[in-house]
Image: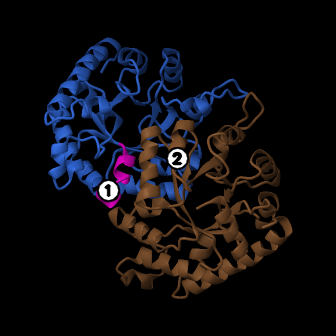
Chain colours: A blue, B brown
Amino acid sequence: MKYQQLSDQIRSKSSYLCVGLDTDINKIPKHLLKEKDPIFEFNKQIIDATIDYAVAYKPNIAFYEALGIKGWESLQKTIEYLPKDVFTIADAKRGDIGNTSKMYAKAFFEQMKFDSITVAPYMGSDSVEPFLEFEDKWVILLALTSNEGGKDFQFEELKSGEKVYQKVLEVSKKWGTQENLMYVVGATRSEEFQQIRKAVPYHFLLVPGVGAQGGNLKELSKYGLNKNGGLLVNSSRGIIYASKGEDFAKVAREKAQTIQQEMKGYLEQFSEV
Amino acid sequence: MKYQQLSDQIRSKSSYLCVGLDTDINKIPKHLLKEKDPIFEFNKQIIDATIDYAVAYKPNIAFYEALGIKGWESLQKTIEYLPKDVFTIADAKRGDIGNTSKMYAKAFFEQMKFDSITVAPYMGSDSVEPFLEFEDKWVILLALTSNEGGKDFQFEELKSGEKVYQKVLEVSKKWGTQENLMYVVGATRSEEFQQIRKAVPYHFLLVPGVGAQGGNLKELSKYGLNKNGGLLVNSSRGIIYASKGEDFAKVAREKAQTIQQEMKGYLEQFSEV
């Protein structure tokens, strides 16, 4: 998918919601367990229920990998089921030496036809560049993560005065363009967001964790949105596990709609989309 | 596997060789393509040929993932085929927020019964700790990688005077012990190795790339070996693709034996194993 197409989707749906498909066999409603492929059946119903309010879907690859071959089958079916006009993210946090990253790129972009993949920056340029060579495919690079351990290294101050995550932004933005590179930004404070937007004003940012991981939608929209939208905000558990009963899809739809309505207001206030 | 068992294996085989199973369908001998599962057949013959000289095997997960479900089947068969007394490494470079890392740990330690997995440090403590909760299983954390891009962030100097990779060693060694935590150290200079051994004198180090990625076995053995061995040195392409003909397994055995003979000398010189 191209930058402009994603931006158009945000305008037409008045939403920058990404639904995280962290589908866990132990957490899905019990009545689905009699299905042949409960994981796919759950995803299918979640997608149908939320498609009017979401512009992106993000399967968390670990949840599928943990089930072995069956999990990969469920993932493959899910990615095939997703409509072509939504943006798809393989949340895989890969990154390895060049020829290995190339293999991962093939797995996610060619075998499974994801639009994008999350990538870890620690191994530097040649671990990321192989993912950037595919047309209309995207790298979403970890810059600032919202977990507690994110503070262990990302906030360390360098001799130059920059923090490690700021260095990651500054260096990596030369590897790609705003047309093929986004950033994971789990900023919890508005100053951080403002600084990040100074470093990468036009790039899309993927913000995890509205809901379970905390995070204030208004604040992050105020500082994160740019004139093209430029923001994808993920919610996983807050939508897909909002109800654990037979009404899970209906409740997921209501939750997604509530978030979308809030987003619509912020788009009018803070963006030109 | 326990520290002592691995150390015993090194002593009994006079070897700290790890064979990297970077098995690529486009690079294996053509006569194997008529087999039902050419990837597994290749691995099986490589394992049989090198088992006398290697103490560890390291499938590079990307190469299997790139083949989709069939690749995962080949990987599963490979891990089941490997004898229990060799140390097995899932070279996967995973790392994510807590509940996601836990899913990856289940996939590699429970579903596939690997002894260890390589993990990226960027997301910090809570991304690594879920892997450390499994008995007799290991995290091999990326500290210093030997690829060109490794220099982008790992060598950045912090205000404290430490380099980023040194900070990773200092902070992370408190998360586990030498009984469940190793480090990937692609050091190319002996001063780096000496500094690393000061920081983590007893931990095992996994050194990639004797062969294709360069690296001098004598130097790294001199500074890397400790009294328990404490070193695993990987060779992938230099062994498994040494011949592309029908004699590939025989030639792989010769290459492995040559490296093992060299290692035997260094163990006598630099270790008490």
Magenta residues, dominant SS class: helix
Q: Amino acid at mark 2?
A: Glu
x then y, percent, for residue B149:
62, 47
Subunit under mark 2: B
Kind of element beneath mark 1: helix
Q: Which mark is residue B133?
A: 2
Left or right of B52, for residue A201: left
Question: Is residue B26 at least partly visible in the picture?
Answer: yes
Residue at 51% over, 40% down: B127
Q: Is residue B203 above or below residue A199?
A: below
The residue stretch that appears in magenta: A60-72
Q: Is residue A61 above or below residue A265?
A: below
Question: Is residue B24 at least partly visible in the picture?
Answer: no
* Viewer-nearest residue: A13 or A122: A122
Q: CA distance from mark 1 to mark 2?
A: 25 Å
- Name the quarter where the N terminus of chain B is drawn: bottom right
* Viewer-nearest residue: A190 or A153: A153
x then y, percent, for residue B92:
50, 55
x then y, percent, for residue A104:
44, 55
Name the quadrant containing residue B228: bottom right
- Name the quarter where the C terminus of chain B is drawn: bottom right
Q: Which residue is mark 1?
A: A72
Mark 1: few, some, or many residues within 10 Å (few <14, many ≥20)? many
* Viewer-nearest residue: A221 or B136: B136
